[in-house]
Image (cartoon, helix red, strand yellow):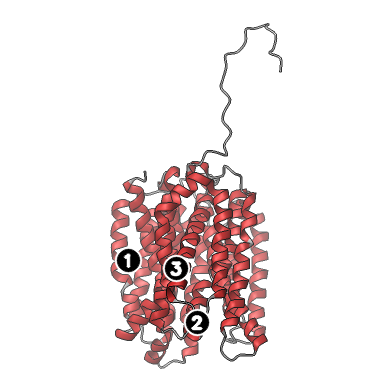
Amino acid sequence: MTSRRTRLASLIVACALFMQNLDSTVIATALPQMARSFGADPVHMSVALTSYLIALAVFIPASGWVADRYGARQVFRAAIAVFTIGSILCGRADSLAFLVVSRVIQGIGGAMMVPVGRLVLLRTVPKNEMVAAMSWLTMPAMLGPVVGPPLGGFIVTNTSWRWIFDLNVPIGVLGVVLVSLFIDEARDPDPAPFDGWGLVWSGLALATIMMGFETLGRHLVPPAWTGALIGTGLLAGLLYVLHARRTPRPLLDLGLLRIPTFAISCTAGTLFRFGVGALPFLLPMMLQLDFGYSAEQSGLTTFATAAGALMVKPLASGVLRRFGFRDTLFWNGLVASVLLAVCAAFRPGWPNWAMFALLLVGGTFRSLQFSAFNTVVYADIPRARMSGATSLYSTVQQLSMTIGITIGAASLEVARAFTGSAVPSVGDFSVAFGCVGLLAIAASPLVLGIARDAGAEMSGNLRGRPVPAPVSAAPPEGSAPARR
């Protein structure tokens, strides 16, 4: 039975995560109206998205150290406040430059808010309640990208785009109050010295790689610029690895990758996110461009994946207790990936209820997979290294979801190049869904490297653990040993 305090802490952190994920997606729908308001070129408005993502990429690696130095609760509360202040400034923006600066402030708050919120749970929730806590935490990650576009469309159509940012204000104020009342403080008594060069190299690597992938195949900048960005990012990443090897306590602790459960969860989870991360990009575009759906109809259909995420919450603990992490990740991952690939078979003649049902079931399996990955990844992490693990894992998650969207877009572009169509056809989307589905399927064999009893204390599944032999009384001194 999950304690009331665990449920409350999980919901507080989940609401902060939902606010960030919703804001990240809802703004995309409003960009044309914002461009008219600023008198700016709509193409240039993409900088409002990338500035936020770059701020996230640069500052997420520092989140663990900041939490250790100043306390997880205090930093989490401050991060919500900074994100809320950034939202207020975005809603008051009167130029593109003002908006970009405000989005950077939002990004700094978001970079601290999500990984530190996860750290709060890891340090305050008992291990046997961690699966339930992570189930609550996973839902907003699934809900935000699905709810964002239709909500943005509704706000832009019926009110001002400024309400997109103003909606965060009451949520942020409530979050600060709830954290102050119900979250316990947890800090490292011996924080590491700040790794300044680590922040420089990791921030440069993540920012330029994400910018490179954001522009890849989208004709926003010349191809040489895209190549230079990715090349710079890879070089900075290599310099960070060399720096981390000779630094006792680096900003991103790559030594955590020697822990099998952490390394496999990162690797397999990244492949799975490559596939699933493309879904919110590909599906609404296919429904609107080729099926003739309005933005509202598309949003209502894709909302099925969010409904599926809600359904899995009461099931996750029981499934993991029955089957354990390894078997759940393998079989559930296969089913979730196949259901993702099935989107390639969608056609305009399909009844809406059939697509909705498949997306609903697929959302359930995908949410369970994320809950399992997000829990078992910390199963063998010592408490002293927990903040470093949340920073590294959050960085990997952020990068993999961005690359997932790029892979989906690139697959669509390649398919369209072969067919020569000006607008992507249903067949082009089928190719893209097939590609990302195969990437997600490739994650399942990797999880077999996780020990059968990994995370048993978290899941409650003890089948894979050896039963200790009974302790018998020692034989009298000088007696003959028993024959085998």
Three-letter amino acid code at disc 2? Answer: Pro
Residue assigned mark 1: 172
Q: Would you place residue 216 above or below residue 38 in this image?
A: above
Q: Would you place residue 263 above or below residue 395 in this image?
A: above
Mark 3 residue element: helix
Viewer-side label of 1, 2: 2
Three-letter amino acid code at disc 3? Answer: Ala
Quadrant position of the C terminus in the picture: top right
Residue 357, which numbered label? 3
Tag 1 near tag 2, CB within 8 Å: no
Q: Residue at x 34, y 79 (%)?
A: 91
First in sequence, mark 1 or 3: give its number.
Answer: 1
Residue assigned mark 2: 348
Q: Residue at x 60, y 51 (%)?
A: 256
Mark 2 residue element: loop
Q: Would you place residue 393 above or below residue 484 in this image?
A: below
- Measured in 3D between alpha carbons, the distance from the residue under mark 1 to the one under mark 3, in whole angstroms, is 34 Å
Residue 143, which numbered label? none
Q: Position of residue 274 (x, y in %)?
A: 58, 67
